Amino acid sequence: MVVVEKEIFINISAGSTRIAITEGEELVELYIELSDQQRMVGNIYKGKVQNVIPGMQAAFIDIGNDVNAFLPFSEIGNPENLGNISISDDDDHEDQPPSKNNSTKNEFDPAKDLKIGDEILIQVIKEPYGGKGPRVTTDISIPGSLLVLVPNSNIIGTSRKISDKYEKRRLRRIVKGFKAQGFGLIVRTIAEGKDQNLIESDFQRSLETWKQMDEHVRVDKAPAIVYQDFSTADQVIRDLFTPEVSKIVVDSKSAYKRLSRYIKEVSPDQLHKLQTHRKKGSIFDQYNVEEQIQKSLRRKVWLKSGAHLVIEQTEAMLVIDVNSGRFIGKKGHEQNSLKINIEAAKEVARQLRLRDIGGLIVIDFIDLHESANKKRVFDELKNALKKDRAKVSLTEFSSFGLLEMTRQRVRLSLLSTVNENCPTCNGLGMIPSKDTILTNIENWLKRFKAKNRDRRLTITMHPDLANYIQESRNKLLKGFMWDNWMLIDMNEDPSLSPDEFKIYSKKRKRDVTSEV
């Protein structure tokens, strides 16, 4: 088995914190936290029920933000957090896992029992997106470095990525020795091989965090945040700093000191992997990360064979089209298509991780006729997606040759994080043609003439449109004047968008564009 070197690079600037993860020098994951964006996933709030809508099978919770949080009834898996949200040392909890299908939940009917004004303890599981509030759950958990603390439960679980059954037994035995009643524990992958003292220390830290949070729950008035999860950089180190990571390089002295203290507590034997960026210039430039980031923002992604992917984001879904491009195969069409599709399947899996795209995804591979070849492509994609931490579900090829899949959406995609909608095209990606704009001007003049007696106007437009009229459509402008019996001057204004125009009345000496 080939071991791929995994590295983490952290760039901290005034505007953002960027964390890049590479495998074999290839960028596979990128996390960006902008200074003006509040990260919410993992935060725990003492909220107040604002509305209960049985038809939507959901409730809306006031957590102190501009937009209420969205709580589906399916996420109410722990009624212990409804109303009686505070804990105490003598609380008596049943030994049951935090399951959305447990018997306690079945006795609780959110549509009837959840009331407006009720206080509720909830945790954010999805960032706000597209004007929607954050998605939340009542299944609270406190992630530590080695363990995840699950209140109101006595479950003991281990990460599926720990494959050694004897190591699993050892870890479960250790956890059973110190686990407190009423608190479940899940052993994380990074705990593999760690001694009992480190594991128990991590439990005590998480338990102390819970007690501090409980004090806020008792005192603070809803809505209020009672627990704030780590920053993006700290969270990535907590969740992804596994033994497979060969080094972590950070370009901030303060971040280095903070991460150094953290690693000393949980994995002191791995401290040598943490480094500071001491060379002049950008850390991302030195390790060839910046160029890969810029490529990840493009619509077209080239493959080594000369084929390419076209990635289109719509409101409803993401569409990926596989094209042969410059690929020149030496075999028949079926084999050439198979080769491209297998290469594309690997790249699709990487792009989904890198761009952090969630929701419905449709992939249009190059047509294959043989069922065995379709299965090879499907298996290749499925295998490549095993590296993805997000939950993924995919179906076989449809009768139209399309492959559909879904990917868990937790945070904003990379494109949504670093970009904003174009004010000119309103996110469409296209603007009206110059002749279409001229038609709009002509229609405006006709409507204006029907309502006003002004006959001396000035049309101000972008220089590109003005040049187009002078070079190709000058007669058309003269036609406007003759048809409407108007005297029209033309001005240029580079501050206007290419599809925008403004019309001024010389008689009234003001802008009259909005009058019609």
Image (spheres, grey):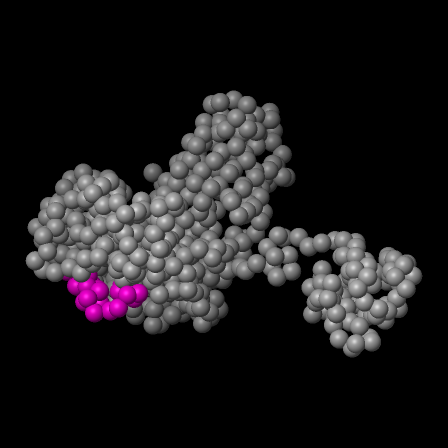
Does the magenta portion include 80? no
The magenta-colored residue range is 204-227
Residue drawn at 51 percent across, 44 percent down:
317
Q: Main secondary structure of the magenta part?
A: helix
- Which percent across, then down, holds residue 47? 30, 61
Q: Is residue 84 left or right of residue 65?
A: left
Name the residue nearer the viewer: 197 or 186. 186
Does the magenta portion include 221? yes
- Which percent across, then down, holds residue 437? 76, 57
Name the residue nearer the viewer: 501 or 120. 120
Name the residue nearer the viewer: 345 or 204. 204
Q: Quadrant of the N terminus?
A: top left
Residue drawn at 49 percent across, 22 percent down:
371
- Which percent across, then down, holds residue 475? 90, 58
Residue drawn at 46 percent across, 69 percent down:
15
The answer to whether any part of residue 198 appears in the image is no
Q: Is residue 97 above or below residue 336?
A: below
Q: Is residue 206 left or right of residue 340?
A: left
Residue drawn at 17 percent across, 42 percent down:
168
